[in-house]
């Protein structure tokens, strides 16, 4: 049984993955806080959490035994809450995106280093069994150098409500680029995080506010909605190594179906991890693929990699990995330095789209 004692900051829907994962890892969740009392009381009753609070400050004061914290709040508050918890001597597992920009991610990494605490992020797609299977081939040298990759998370009707924090740039940092950054992150993970050199991007606002393009989940519409983020984005990233990455993200774009994928081309093998949906956001319709592409005996060979399905899409596995990392029994799926590179790319996508020119990353 784990000796880890955990507190949860934020009581939204994502905690339905965090809390069961901590319990699966035999860690003890002793408190949850959220200014919306109904949320904390509901989750506390559901999962048997003994303490509820309206604020993080109150939780940390009243439960000093907490050793690790999950940060499950809107994007705007990720850096503020994570840094406060790190400075209070707690390990931190933060929801995606790491922060609103690269400077905030850098500040978070600095706080973790200064306090000698572990900071990890919920890049749950790295924790998927398909991703870990492909990563073993990459780490074993079977793929060679990945020269190029394509990262897609595209939706046809996937706007997560109108006027909630997802569609307000001040709260979220942006639209599908920052919300659906998982495949950009996964491509960088497979490429082993080369240093980005420059980014060229365009964003599009078509279908903004059109209810026909709303997704089947998300935050209820506001009475006077603010929707000031992009609906789609296309970007090209070049790295100092000469490697390149093409990215495409959308909530509302005229595609055949939702696709969540990374495809890469290496010097020894290519590969793909992909999830297709008949209906946007409906997990029951998902079709998963995980493949390697090689030349063998003068023939083109497609290797299908079979793994056990994970209905949680790595969300619980990522939390369990955080617990095991603290205990020293597992290698972490994410590092703070990687989050900085990811946010440099995300930030440059928005800057390039705004000015219409390539953005160099220093």
Image (cartoon, grey):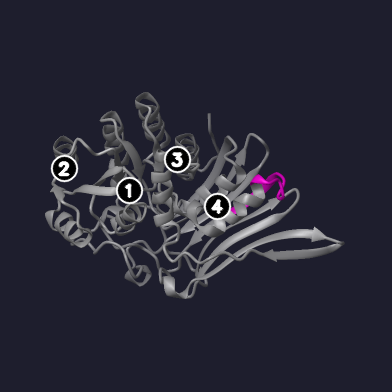
The answer to which quarter of the image holds residue 280 is bottom left
Q: Which residue is mark 3?
A: 347
Q: Which residue is mark 4?
A: 247
- Mark 4 lies on a secondary structure that is strand
Nearer-N-terminus badge (2/1): 2
Nearer-N-terminus badge (3/2): 2
* Numbered circle sitting on residue 67: none
Nearer-N-terminus badge (1/3): 1
145 in magenta? yes
Of marks 3 and 2, the one in the foreground: 2
Q: Looking at this view, is 350 or 127 the one in front? A: 127
Cα–Cα gap, marks 2 and 1: 20 Å
Image coords of residue 30 (percent x, y): 21, 47
Image coords of residue 161 (percent x, y): 30, 63
Q: Which residue is mark 2?
A: 55
Q: Which residue is mark 1?
A: 172
Cα–Cα gap, marks 1 and 4: 20 Å
Relative placement, left or right, of 346 versus 188 is left
Nearer-N-terminus badge (1/4): 1
Of marks 4 and 2, the one in the foreground: 2
Relative placement, left or right, of 340 versus 235 is left
Cα–Cα gap, marks 3 and 2: 30 Å
């Amino acid at each position: 049984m784990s000796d880890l004692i955990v507190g949860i900051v934020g009581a939204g829907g994502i905690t339905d993955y965090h809390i069961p994962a901590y319990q699966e890892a035999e860690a003890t969740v002793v408190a949850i806080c959220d200014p919306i009392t109904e949320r904390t009381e509901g989750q506390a009753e559901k999962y048997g959490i003994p303490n509820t609070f309206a604020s993080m400050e109150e939780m940390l004061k009243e439960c000093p035994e907490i050793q690790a914290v999950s940060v499950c709040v809107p994007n705007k508050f990720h850096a503020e809450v994570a840094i406060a918890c790190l400075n209070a001597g707690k390990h931190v597992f933060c929801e995606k995106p790491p922060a609103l920009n690269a400077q905030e991610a850098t500040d978070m990494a600095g706080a973790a280093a200064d306090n000698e605490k572990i900071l990890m992020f919920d890049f749950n797609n790295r924790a998927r069994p398909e991703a870990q299977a492909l990563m073993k081939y990459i780490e074993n040298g079977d793929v060679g150098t990945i020269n190029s990759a394509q990262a897609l998370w595209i939706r046809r009707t996937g706007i997560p409500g109108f006027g909630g924090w997802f569609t307000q740039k001040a709260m979220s940092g942006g639209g599908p680029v920052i919300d659906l950054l998982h495949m950009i992150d996964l491509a960088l993970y497979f490429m082993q995080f080369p240093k980005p050199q420059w980014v060229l991007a365009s964003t599009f606002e078509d279908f903004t506010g059109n209810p026909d393009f709303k997704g089947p989940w998300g935050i209820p519409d506001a009475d006077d909605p603010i929707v000031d983020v992009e609906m789609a984005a296309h970007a090209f990233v070049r790295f100092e190594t000469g490697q390149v990455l093409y990215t495409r993200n959308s909530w509302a774009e005229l595609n055949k179906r939702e696709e969540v994928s990374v495809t890469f081309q290496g010097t020894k093998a290519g590969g793909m991890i992909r999830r297709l949906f008949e209906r946007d956001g409906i997990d029951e319709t998902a079709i998963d693929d995980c493949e390697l592409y090689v030349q063998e005996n003068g023939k083109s060979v497609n290797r299908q990699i079979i793994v056990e399905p994970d209905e949680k899409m790595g969300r619980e596995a990522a939390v369990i990995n955080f617990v095991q990392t603290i205990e020293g029994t597992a290698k972490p799926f994410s590092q703070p330095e990687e989050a900085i590179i990811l946010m440099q790319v995300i930030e440059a996508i928005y800057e390039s789209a705004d000015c219409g020119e390539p953005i160099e990353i220093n």
